[in-house]
Image (tube, coloured by chain):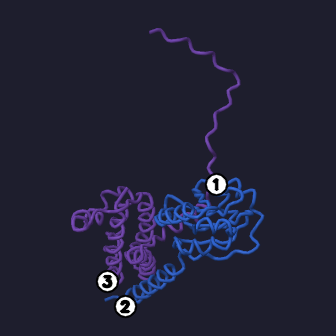
Chain colours: A blue, B purple
């Protein structure tokens, strides 16, 4: 029995469990971002349509949760009028990744109809989290249409 | 493409092996784990833990509902290989603390993958790319100063 090793093993297992639990709880939470504009040209270049609320998703090939995120965002975009979903391969747009301060995939930016970044989520959000982030940005007309 | 439960099973086995390494302080055991990482990184289909999964576990489970690409698995195994080699070098050269700490980092990564399905190597990949990588320049046709004469029609 190697006591140094036993201590290192115990510390590693506790640290991994704590990190895993924190990561699981945080994943997908949409953080509000205030006055984050000035990226209008870049966002247009990335294919964000004007006049709609857009879920701009950054993905990479090295990323299993990106697929789940794609399904959820695409569903919301399909179900709610006035919401679009744009997916970007982070690897091929590293300049945008740097400019928009993306560090991990999947990251979803919630962009309002005027082209401002209103929120960002790392990890896979739930459908309810996406809906809650999108709802305050929609016009009354769109909300009426989606509930009809 | 592979059944994502295979790498997850491999991560659980890796966790057990690394705990055994730390409890026994065996440099040879961590060297054996390094060999497993190396084989899996080089030929993912021949990874010993993956073979064990396909022979013993997969037949008892329902077929996979989704498949994942092999590239992330190989990348993560390569990161694991680096830590396992440092650990083996530490233990076998008598620097036991170095060996234990490197094995501890590998254990954190293996445990996160096995217990939570969170692949640290994959999470770090984009951060690594944005620090070091340049955007890829797209292919463009080379300028041709003299237009080539049209090829004569081939006789049939």
Q: Is residue B35 left or right of residue A50?
A: left
Q: Is residue A135 left or right of residue A115?
A: left
Residue B127: x and y in percent read 59, 66
Q: Quadrant of the C terminus of chain B?
A: top left
Local packing at callout 2 (Cα closer than 10 Å; few below 14, some 14-19, many 20+) is few
Residue B47: x and y in percent read 31, 61
Relative to A31, residue A96 above or below: above
Q: Residue furthest front?
A: A148
Q: Are marks 2 and 3 on the same chain?
A: no
The residue where tag 1 is placed is: B134
Which numbered dot is residue A3? Answer: 2
Q: Are marks 1 and 2 on the same chain?
A: no
Q: Is residue A64 left or right of residue A104?
A: left
Q: Earlier in the sequence, mark 1 or mark 3?
A: 3
From the image, state whether disc 1 or disc 2 is nearer to you. Answer: 1
Q: Residue at x 57, y 56 (%)?
A: A89
């Amino acid at each position: 029995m190697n006591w140094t090793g036993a201590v290192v093993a115990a510390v590693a297992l506790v640290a991994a469990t704590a990190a895993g639990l924190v990561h699981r709880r945080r994943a997908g939470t949409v953080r509000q971002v205030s006055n984050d504009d000035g990226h209008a040209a870049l966002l247009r270049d990335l294919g964000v349509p004007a006049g709609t609320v857009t879920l701009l998703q950054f993905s990479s090939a090295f990323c299993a949760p990106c697929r789940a995120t794609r399904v959820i965002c695409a569903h919301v975009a399909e179900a709610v009028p006035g919401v679009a979903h744009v997916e970007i391969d982070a690897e091929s747009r590293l300049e945008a990744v740097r400019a928009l301060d993306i560090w991990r995939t999947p990251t979803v930016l919630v962009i309002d109809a005027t082209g401002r970044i209103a929120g960002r989520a790392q990890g896979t959000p739930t459908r309810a989290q996406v809906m809650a982030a999108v709802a305050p940005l929609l016009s009354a007309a769109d909300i009426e249409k989606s509930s009809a | 493409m592979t059944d994502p439960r295979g790498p997850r099973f491999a991560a659980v086995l890796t966790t057990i092996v690394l705990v055994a390494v730390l409890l026994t302080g065996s440099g040879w055991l961590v060297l054996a784990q390094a060999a497993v990482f190396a084989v899996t990184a080089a030929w993912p289909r021949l990874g010993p833990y993956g073979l064990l999964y396909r022979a013993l576990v997969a037949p008892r489970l329902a077929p996979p509902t989704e498949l994942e690409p092999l590239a992330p698995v190989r990348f993560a195994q390569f990161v694991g290989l680096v830590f396992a080699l440092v650990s083996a070098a530490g233990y076998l050269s008598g620097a036991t603390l170095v060996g234990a700490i490197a094995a501890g980092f590998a254990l954190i990564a293996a445990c996160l993958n096995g217990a939570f399905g969170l692949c640290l190597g994959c999470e770090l990949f984009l951060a690594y790319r944005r620090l070091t990588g340049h955007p890829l320049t797209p292919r463009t046709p080379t300028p041709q100063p003299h237009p080539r004469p049209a090829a004569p029609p081939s006789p049939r």
